[in-house]
Image (cartoon, rainbow, N blue to C red):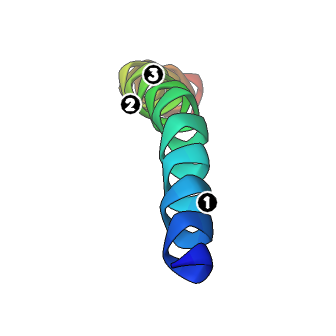
Amino acid sequence: MALTDFVLALSGLLGSLLIPFAGLYWMLRLKRRTEAPAAASASGRAK
């Protein structure tokens, strides 16, 4: 019983911490995706 409560509490804590970090990772990935083609085209024009 105590082990089950511990596992549930731990998974709830990790789940609540995972959501903000997943959102931050997703936002950074979207930002990097929008900046990458602009940087590639700028370096292509410089050659």
Residue count near mark 3 (Cα–Cα under 10 Å), binned few <14, some 14–19, many ≥20: few
Look at 51% across and 20% down and name the residue there: 42
Residue type pointed to by label 1: Leu
- Label 2 Cα crowd, 10 Å radius (few <14 / some 14-19 / many 20+): few
Question: Percent from the top left, x then y, of residue 26?
Answer: 41, 32
Which label sits in the foreground, 3 or 2?
3
- Measuring 52% from the left and 36% from the top, which residue is drawn there? 16
Indicate which disc, 1 or 2, sits on the residue closer to the N terminus: 1
- Which of the two labelled residues, at mark 3 and mark 1, occupies the earlier sequence position? 1
Q: Distance of mark 1 from mark 2, alpha carbons?
A: 34 Å
- Calculate the distance from the C-alpha at mark 3 to the C-alpha at mark 2: 10 Å
Tag 2: amino acid: Arg
Q: Is residue 38 above or below residue 32?
A: above
Closest to the camera, between mark 1 and mark 2, is 1
The image quarter in which residue 34 lies: top left
Compared to 23, does 21 lie above or below? Answer: below
Position of the C terminus by quadrant = top right
Question: Which element carries disc 3, helix, strand or loop?
Answer: helix
**Location of mark 1 (residue):** 10
Q: Position of residue 17 (x, y in %)?
A: 61, 38
Which of the marked residues, 3 or 2, is nearer the chain's N terminus? 3
Task: Tell me residue 7's x, y (percent).
Answer: 55, 71
Where's residue 12, x and y in %? 50, 48
Describe the element under mark 2 as helix, strand or loop.
helix
> Given contact means CB atoms under 8 Å apart, are the residues at marks 3 and 1 in contact?
no
Name the residue that disc number 3 marks: 27
Q: Which residue is mark 2?
A: 33
